[in-house]
Image: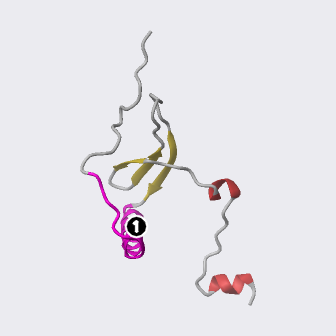
């Protein structure tokens, strides 16, 4: 069956560039929303670094944000079934202002 016929049969042809496939590490997500969109900024904060930058920003419609919530919930449930409960912290394990402060 040709690729074109496969796509017509309900499959999506998705290309993944090498640089995107490597991924970007994030240990903080900041989420904001308006009436028409959700904006998720992914940040990597590290000890000893007084400033961090947004590494990636994803903009979603409210419908897609809700689908993402459901998909994450389903995947977390499957992960916990296979590997045990993911423990959450009452407080964040590292404060957002961690690291040494500079003095002149």
Q: Could you tell me how many numbered marks the image carries?
A: 1
Residue extending farthest to the front is 84
Rendering quarter of residue 86: bottom left
Does 82 lie within the magenta span? yes
For residue 104, what is the image quadrant?
top left
Please report the residue visible at 44 percent of the width from the left and 28 percent of the height from the top: 50
Position of residue 71 measured from the top left corner of the image (x, y, whole percent): 41, 70
Q: Position of residue 52 (x, y in %)?
A: 47, 35
Extreme-left residue of the structure: 90
* Residue 91 is covered by the magenta coloring: no
Residue that sits furthest to the right in the current view: 2
Q: Is residue 74 left or right of residue 24?
A: left
Q: Residue under label 1, please give it.
A: 72
**x then y, percent, for residue 17:** 69, 59
- Label 1: how many residues lie within 10 Å, few (<14), some (14-19) or many (20+)? few
Image quadrant occupied by the N terminus: bottom right
Q: Residue at x 34, y 51 (%)?
A: 34
Question: Magenta residues: mostly which secondary structure?
Answer: helix
User: Judging from the image, what secondary structure is the residue with disc 1 in?
Assistant: helix
In the image, residue 48 above or below residue 87: above
Q: Quadrant of residue 12?
A: bottom right
Residue 57 location in percent, x, y?
A: 49, 48
Span colored in magenta = 62-89
Give the side of residue 20 with respect to residue 66, left or right: right
Residue toward you, 34 or 76:
76
């Amino acid at each position: 069956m040709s690729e074109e016929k496969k796509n017509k049969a309900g499959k999506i042809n998705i290309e993944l560039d090498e640089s995107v496939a490597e991924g970007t590490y994030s240990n903080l997500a900041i989420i904001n929303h308006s009436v028409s969109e959700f904006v998720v900024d992914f940040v990597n904060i590290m000890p000893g670094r007084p400033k961090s930058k947004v590494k990636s920003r994803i903009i979603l419609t409210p419908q897609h944000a809700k689908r993402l919530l459901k998909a994450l919930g389903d995947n977390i449930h499957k992960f916990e079934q296979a590997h045990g409960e993911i423990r959450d912290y009452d407080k964040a394990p590292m404060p957002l202002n961690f690291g040494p402060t500079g003095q002149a």
